[in-house]
Image (cartoon, rainbow, N blue to C red):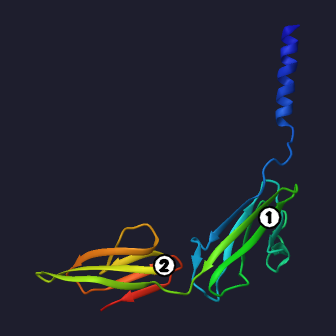
């Protein structure tokens, strides 16, 4: 008797483990480009990403406009992975936000507010000290500043290490031609050669 009860219980568990389950996961929404939070003001700016769900993507809206109804997305509705791209309506300098909403076949929904700083202003470079050390060696100090974040400073071919910041101080020694390149997070660049 106990063996039959145990067998029935085991079979019942196995069968319910195979039964289809409802959609328990919301769709995944990821932006892949641009990678940083800032870009230069360019006419060819595109926001690129993908939506993914185990039951299929039924709707992908950007600021209320259905992307899957646009030319080029005809066969995408219902797919489990949908790659997408769109151009923002605002491409002038400043903060731009877009509301992206994806809905799956089961009605699950994921919303993302995507902020992007459109930055057309390059960083500035100011030298604070130049000291001749002898033997053709020069020590140079300076500051790179940006209205957003300075992400890279290259001094006479050598990249300086730092965390991106609005203002970055640097000091280096060189025997080569003095050349300083400062880039901001959006990719704007200043080349300084005194």
Task: For the N terminus, give its image quadrant.
Answer: top right
Give the position of the C terminus as an image quadrant.
Answer: bottom left
Q: Which residue is farthest front?
A: 128
Residue at 80% x, 64% y: name it.
Answer: 102
Displayed quadrant of residue 143? bottom left
- Vertical placement of residue 145 versus 192, above or below: above
The single residue placed furthest to the left in the displayed view is 135
Q: What element carries label 2?
A: strand
Rendered residue at 37%/68% (across/down) = 161
**How packed is label 2: few (under 14 Cα within 10 Å), some, or many (20 or more)?**
many
Residue at numbered disc 2: 184
Identify the residue under disc 1.
102
Q: In which quarter of the image is residue 33?
A: bottom right
Q: Where is residue 15 in the image (x, y as percent from the top left)?
A: 86, 31
Decide if residue 24 is in sight here. Answer: yes
Q: Which residue is drawn at 88% across and 19% down?
A: 8
Residue under the image location 81 percent in, 47 percent down? 24
The residue tagged with tag 1: helix, strand or loop?
A: strand
Position of residue 116 measured from the top left corner of the image (x, y, whole percent): 64, 75
């Amino acid at each position: 008797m106990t063996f039959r009860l145990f067998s029935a219980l085991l079979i019942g568990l196995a069968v319910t483990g195979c039964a289809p389950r409802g959609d328990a996961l919301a769709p995944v929404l990821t932006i892949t480009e641009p990678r940083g939070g800032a870009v230069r003001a360019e006419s060819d700016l595109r926001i690129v990403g993908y939506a993914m769900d185990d039951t299929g993507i039924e709707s992908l809206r950007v600021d209320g406009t259905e992307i899957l109804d646009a030319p080029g997305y005809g066969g995408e509705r219902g797919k489990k992975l949908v790659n997408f791209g769109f151009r923002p309506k605002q491409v002038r300098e400043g903060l731009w936000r877009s509301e992206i909403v994806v809905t799956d076949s089961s009605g699950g929904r994921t919303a993302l507010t995507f902020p992007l700083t459109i930055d057309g202003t390059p960083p500035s470079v100011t030298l604070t000290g130049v000291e001749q050390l002898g033997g053709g060696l020069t020590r140079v100090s300076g500051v790179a500043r940006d209205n957003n974040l300075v992400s890279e400073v290259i001094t006479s071919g050598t990249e300086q290490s730092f965390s991106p910041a609005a203002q970055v101080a640097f000091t280096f020694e060189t025997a080569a031609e003095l050349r300083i390149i400062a880039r901001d997070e959006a990719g704007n660049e200043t080349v300084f050669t005194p």
